Image: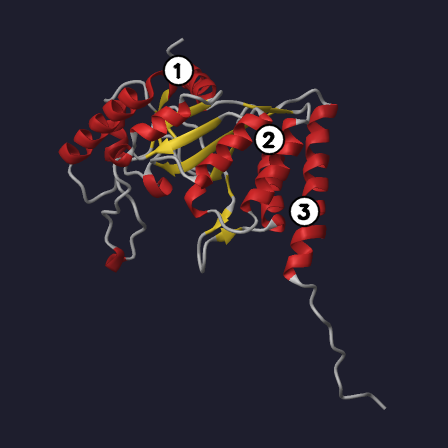
Amino acid sequence: MISSIAPVFEPVPESRHFAGDGQGVFEHHLTQHLNWFEERGLIVKFWWRDDDAVSPTPALEELLVFSDRFRIPLSLAVIPKFATDALAQRLANTQDVHAVHHGWQHKNYQKKIYGEKASEFGWWRTSKEMAKELAEGREILQNLFGERFVPLFVPPWNRIAPRAVHLLKQQGDYGLSAFTWINHFRLPRLQSHVDIIKWKKNKRFIGWEAARKRLDLQLCRRRTNVAEPIGLLTHHLDHGEGCSEFLEAFFKLTSAHSAVEWLSSQDLLDQAKHDFTLAAGQV
């Protein structure tokens, strides 16, 4: 006789998975990947971008401590309109932290009623407005941060219209940084690839398994293109439970591995400009 009562399976509590197996599996797989490159004498390049900086906060301080402790360069995407002298003064005491250009005031001009995704430098704005904001933003950041300023434009929400890119080119030696795959619009680019925050339905850490899969994809791609840097993306003002633990574990492992090189946005932008010039046949 077959029992009609189905067996009961109790799920593993999320906190137990997070604290134990999840992190262990992540570190094991990441180490395996990096060992593959080490065995072949190859180096994986990483860089770190953190968005929405305007002033010193405890959340930002944690990242600055990580940067100093693990000797990892940090590129802060600073919102020019709201950037403070206090932030510039704090960064003056850091070893390898740069400021990059993050829009103007991080304001959305797209039409949500039409189902459009958020963008500050999008399709509804005039060239005159955008050109003015780009120029003023650059001036503010250069005055505040001096040599720490890197002419790398990070469009809010990682979206930018082709017309705005054309205006960006007129500003001079700029590069462009967005997220994952994007047409380079005939500009040197430096992309971010691994965002550690899950944005929908309460902002939180994506989890160890999601982080493992995202890095797995990028590291598999680097097996055929090791020259392309992998960009880590953080947002210090939005970090929730798990973000700090992930960053500490990730930085500890990668900073100690011989197959990894953490580079600054300045170094990588210089290389991107050189590669862009070669591709354009100007050298």
Answer left or right for 165 relative to 279: left
Residue in the picture at 24% in, 59% down: 113
Answer left or right for 154 relative to 74: left
Say if 241 sits above or below 97 in the image: below
Element under disc 2: helix
Say if 245 sits above or below 73 in the image: below
Which kind of residue does numbered mark 3 sit on?
Gln
Whether residue 230 is visible: no
- Res 222 label: 2
- Res 277 label: 1
Residue located farthest toward the bottom when viewing the structure as drawn: 1
Which kind of residue does numbered mark 1 sit on?
Thr
Which one is earlier in the sequence, the residue at label 1 or at label 2? 2
Whether residue 140 is visible: yes
Residue in the picture at 64% in, 33% down: 252
Q: Quadrant of residue 164?
A: top left
Residue 80 placement (x, y as % from top left): 27, 32
Residue in the picture at 72% in, 30% down: 36
Q: Quadrant of residue 3?
A: bottom right
Q: What residue is pinned by disc 3?
A: 23
Q: Tell me how far mark 1 sits from mark 2, CA to CA.
A: 22 Å
Quarter of the picture containing the N terminus is bottom right
